[in-house]
């Protein structure tokens, strides 16, 4: 794990941010013969950062985040687009302190060869050091089956109703917390729980306080070191203890010697989850999020395009 950790760990709307991330060039999208769109992304610091147009302007750099129930942009982007920002919404960032955001509508969101029409965006300040301007949340995954090839830094977006999986990957059932937050069942050190899938979290595994306390995991695993837990829209998460988990099972898949961060702030929305699975773990696979089919598909990394 690294000190510039991002973590979006909320039940309602969350954003995790990183610091000092280098930008890389992202080339244009292309369309496959079956109509699915192939969209490159910037994988800096193990996040999925997309080049997105909003109402024909941009591109803007938005993180694709399974941990977020909605889309969000910074006030600077809203101003550039000339959007009317109205009302306010509470943002649950997994901390005791809520953040607030305005609400605006974007007529067209362009993502490669795909367009999302009439999308609601939350408008909230981001820390000035982050190299992105907002994020895209659950609506993308409701509309498309999303395949993530971390090796080539490309997404494949297939309209959800047209997706038909014929491969031999490991299929894990998904369940959804409050409709939009995907979870998979995982076993850590012999105890099982439902873990949030969070592509806004750029580490491997987070263990949340209620699950840790119930199974006395802080006694079972000796801390290797302490680190800052990252930043959210409501402030810093605080220190976490980094441990090594000898065995992590996802269905028939067993991963050995995985680093995990133990979070300490109990009594928050994180109590709904055993923990979070982030991109540093998911990038070991070719990953397909199929919300319509209620499944996560993990394939061995591909060796050719």
Image: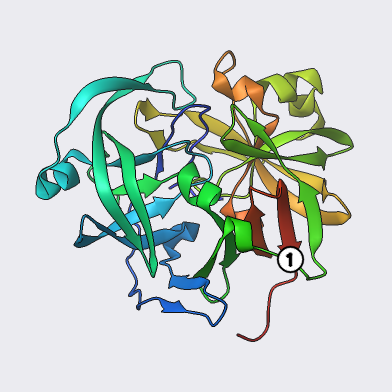
- The residue sitting at 83% across, 69% down in the picture is 168
- The residue sitting at 17% across, 43% down in the picture is 78
Outermost residue to the bottom: 304
The image position of residue 26, as x and y in percent, is 35, 74
User: How has the structure been colored for display?
Assistant: rainbow
Which is more toward the observer, 295 or 41? 295
Q: Is residue 222 above or below residue 155?
A: above
Can see residue 284? no
Query: In the visual, does 35 lie left or right of 175?
Result: left
Outermost residue to the top: 267
- The residue sitting at 62% across, 63% down in the picture is 162
Outermost residue to the front: 161
Which is more toward the observer, 27 or 46? 27
Q: Quadrant of the C terminus?
A: bottom right
Q: Which residue is mark 1?
A: 165
Q: Is residue 10 above or below residue 246?
A: above
Can see residue 198? yes
The image position of residue 102, as x and y in percent, is 24, 28
- The residue sitting at 54% across, 17% down in the picture is 268
Mark 1 closeness class: few <14, some 14–19, many ≥20 residues within 10 Å? few
Query: In the visual, does 36 lie left or right of 273?
Result: left
The image position of residue 71, as x and y in percent, is 37, 41
The image position of residue 287, as x and y in percent, is 65, 61
């Amino acid at each position: 794990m690294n000190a510039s950790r991002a973590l979006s760990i909320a039940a309602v709307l969350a954003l995790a941010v990183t610091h000092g991330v280098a930008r890389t060039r992202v080339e244009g999208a292309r369309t496959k013969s079956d109509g699915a769109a192939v969209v490159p992304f910037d994988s800096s610091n193990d996040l999925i950062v997309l080049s997105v147009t909003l109402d024909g302007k941009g591109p803007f750099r938005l993180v694709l985040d399974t941990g977020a129930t909605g889309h969000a942009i910074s006030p600077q982007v809203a101003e550039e687009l000339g959007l009317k920002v109205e009302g306010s919404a509470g943002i649950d960032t997994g901390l005791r302190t809520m953040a607030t955001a305005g609400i605006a509508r974007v007529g067209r969101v362009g993502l490669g060869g795909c367009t999302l029409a009439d999308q609601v965006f939350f408008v909230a300040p981001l820390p000035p050091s982050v190299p992105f301007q907002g994020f895209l949340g659950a609506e993308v995954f409701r509309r498309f089956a999303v395949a993530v090839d971390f090796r080539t830094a490309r997404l494949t977006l297939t309209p959800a109703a047209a997706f038909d999986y014929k491969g031999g990957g490991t299929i894990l059932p998904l369940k959804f917390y409050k409709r939009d937050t995907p979870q998979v069942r995982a076993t850590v050190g012999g105890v099982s729980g439902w873990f949030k899938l969070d592509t806004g979290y750029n580490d491997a595994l987070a263990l949340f306080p209620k699950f840790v306390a119930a199974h006395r995991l802080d006694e079972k695993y000796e801390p290797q070191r302490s680190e800052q837990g990252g930043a959210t829209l409501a402030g810093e998460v605080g220190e976490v203890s980094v441990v090594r988990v000898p065995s992590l099972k996802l269905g028939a898949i067993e991963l050995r010697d995985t680093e995990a961060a133990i979070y300490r702030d109990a009594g928050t929305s994180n109590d709904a989850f055993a923990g979070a699975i982030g991109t540093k773990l998911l990038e070991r696979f070719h990953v397909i999020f199929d919300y319509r089919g209620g499944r996560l598909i993990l394939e061995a990394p591909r060796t050719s395009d």
